[in-house]
Image (cartoon, grey):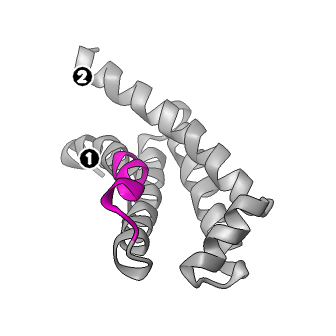
Amino acid sequence: MSTIETAILVIQGLLGLIMLASGGVKFIRTDFHTTQFDQFGYPQWFLIVTGGVEVLGGLGLLAGLVFAPILGVLGGFLIATTMIGAILTHLVRVDDPLSASIPAAVFLVAGLVVMIPELLTFQP
């Protein structure tokens, strides 16, 4: 296994754990996140949906390490699309400074790093 392949697997595992934690705290509706979603102008049910998608994405990333790599691709896709929504929320919906989007941008890139190599070599 090459160094790059090892790095991608490490990124996949770390991103999976981070998304489990991030989605979990949204799913249980912490005060910080309920206030933040109010500021974004989103209904509280969307907080639960967002947390659920992050948890599913994290589980997919982790399951992809153990079972079928395509699960990691699906998890990476869920995370990437969710992070695009987060970036747009910060930059367009609430006009936050660019720095508010940095974590979501990092997670977006990590999700793509996990997805793209597997998709390029995928053979059904």
Magenta part of the chain: 96-106
For the residue pair 89 and 3, the one nearer the viewer reads as: 89
Q: Is residue 84 magenta?
A: no
Residue 16 is situated, as x and y percent measured from the top left of the image, at 54, 40
Q: Which mark is residue 122?
A: 1
Identify the secondary structure beneath mark 2.
Answer: helix
From the viewer's perspective, is the residue at label 1 or at label 2 nearer? 2
Residue 38 is situated, as x and y percent measured from the top left of the image, at 65, 78
Please identify the residue farthest to the left as the structure is shown. Answer: 120
Identify the secondary structure beneath mark 1.
Answer: loop
Q: Which mark is residue 4?
A: 2
Q: Is residue 101 magenta?
A: yes
Residue at horizontal 35%, vertical 45%? 106
Q: Is residue 34 left or right of residue 114?
A: right
Residue 59 is situated, as x and y percent measured from the top left of the image, at 61, 46
Q: Amino acid at mark 2?
A: Ile
Quadrant of res 113: top left
Quarter of the N terminus within the rendering:
top left
Q: Amino acid at mark 1?
A: Phe
Q: Main secondary structure of the magenta part?
A: helix
Q: Which mark is residue 63?
A: none
Residue 105 is situated, as x and y percent measured from the top left of the image, at 34, 52
